[in-house]
Image (cartoon, rainbow, N blue to C red):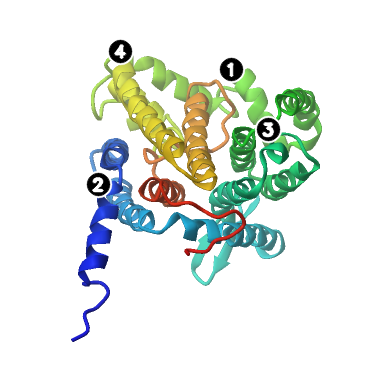
Amino acid sequence: MTVSALTRPGERDRLIVKLSEIDWIFVLTLCLISGAGAVMLFSVAGSSWDPWAAKHVMRFSLCLALMIGLAMIDIRVWFALSYPIYAVGLLLLVAVEAVGDTRLGAQRWLAIGSFSFQPSEIMKLGIVMGLARFYHSASAETARLSWKLLIPATMLMAPVLLVAHQPDLGTAMLILMTGAAIIVLAGLDWRIIAGGALAFLAVVPPFVMFVMHEYQRERVLNFLHPERDPSGTGYHSLQSMIALGSGGLLGKGYGLGSQSQLNFLPEKQTDFIFATLAEEFGFLGCTSVLILYAAVIFMALRTAYISHSHFGRLAAAGTTATFTLYVLINGAMVMGLAPVVGVPMPLLSYGGTVMLTVMIGFGLVSSVRVHRYNEVASGKGSLL
């Protein structure tokens, strides 16, 4: 009598072993951050599960199941899919230029029937996997200093320029900094790093003055002097800083934040959810959540460190870099230390697209951990 592979003892035992290799403390920490998000979304909706908190919990539950499922996939399968995922993401970004939907003055979406999505979200994962695969097969000399560095530079700048043209400067910067982090971690020569940093500083002023759209330039000027237009371009930053400062050490109390509850704070459920947390739970509440974020980053980087394959190390580190940049950019934006660019606080803010992207990335990180002893042959995706 033939037994299904799903119930075959050897297959079942192997699945159990893989599940045991998942870092469940890492999973628990992600649940705590998402739980804090649900608590805050319940509060800003006037102590109601609708319209945000219930959907947030449901989405996270589905994404968590997806993450655990992706952790079961062999790292060599991820390796084999790296270039195709990057290529698909790039082609979809080109498609946005040709037939993308325009909303609020930005052409960022592709529509398939009633379903629409932003291809830039796919590229956040695609750039990590594509660059990790390139450097897995590259020699140390190539990674340090070689004309072949034009290949990863082109791989990085192509999606960055396409996303910036949509325009979506926040996502473009996120992709750029993630890719740059992978290139540096792969062993880039310090002279190129120093030269690149100087070139970046030299390019910023003319870029702001002559390349940015008017509304983007206003965001930068508002970041420098938000009080110049307190009821217009400076409104978001000023209201966020008021919410942060009014929370004090312990906060005003759950559901008692005046800035969020009275709707002075804009985008209180998405971009500025962290300001809402600060107002209601104060410095102590903010610090607690930031410790959870730091723990996630530390555990993900530890996974990168223990991986036996170069692809696994760079893929896990690159995914962690994306997550870290989300946290740093949103935190700086909320505190008035960076322009308002529409980058949410991952897992805390309301929004299914970013949550899905982050959890797929952590599925890759978890796969690296589960299959950390697997060797990946250079230039091959074979499972043999």
Amino acid type, residue under disc 2 in the picture: Trp
| Residue to which mark 4 is pinned | 249
State the separation of the CA atoms marked 2 and 4: 27 Å
First-in-chain label (4 vs 3): 3
Q: Residue sitting at 42 percent across and 45 percent down?
A: 365
In which image quadrant can residue 65 be found? bottom left
The numbered disc on residue 275 is none
Q: Which residue is most to the left?
A: 1
| Residue to which mark 3 is pinned | 188
First-in-chain label (2 vs 4): 2
Amino acid type, residue under disc 1 in the picture: Glu
State the separation of the CA atoms marked 3 and 1: 42 Å
Q: Secondary structure at mark 1?
A: helix
Amino acid type, residue under disc 3 in the picture: Leu
The one of 31 and 152 positioned closer to us in this rendering: 152
First-in-chain label (2 vs 1): 2
Amino acid type, residue under disc 4 in the picture: Leu
Disc 4 vs disc 3: which is toward the camera?
Answer: 3
State the separation of the CA atoms marked 3 and 2: 49 Å
Q: Secondary structure at mark 2?
A: loop
Disc 2 vs disc 4: which is toward the camera?
Answer: 4
Disc 1 vs disc 4: which is toward the camera?
Answer: 4
10 Å neighbourhood of mark 3: few (<14), some, or many (≥20)? many
In the rendered image, which quarter contains the N terminus?
A: bottom left
Disc 3 vs disc 2: which is toward the camera?
Answer: 3
When the figure is inspected, residue 223 is found, relative to residue 87, above or below; the finding is above
State the separation of the CA atoms marked 1 and 4: 25 Å
The numbered disc on residue 49 is 2
Q: Secondary structure at mark 3?
A: loop
| Residue to which mark 1 is pinned | 227
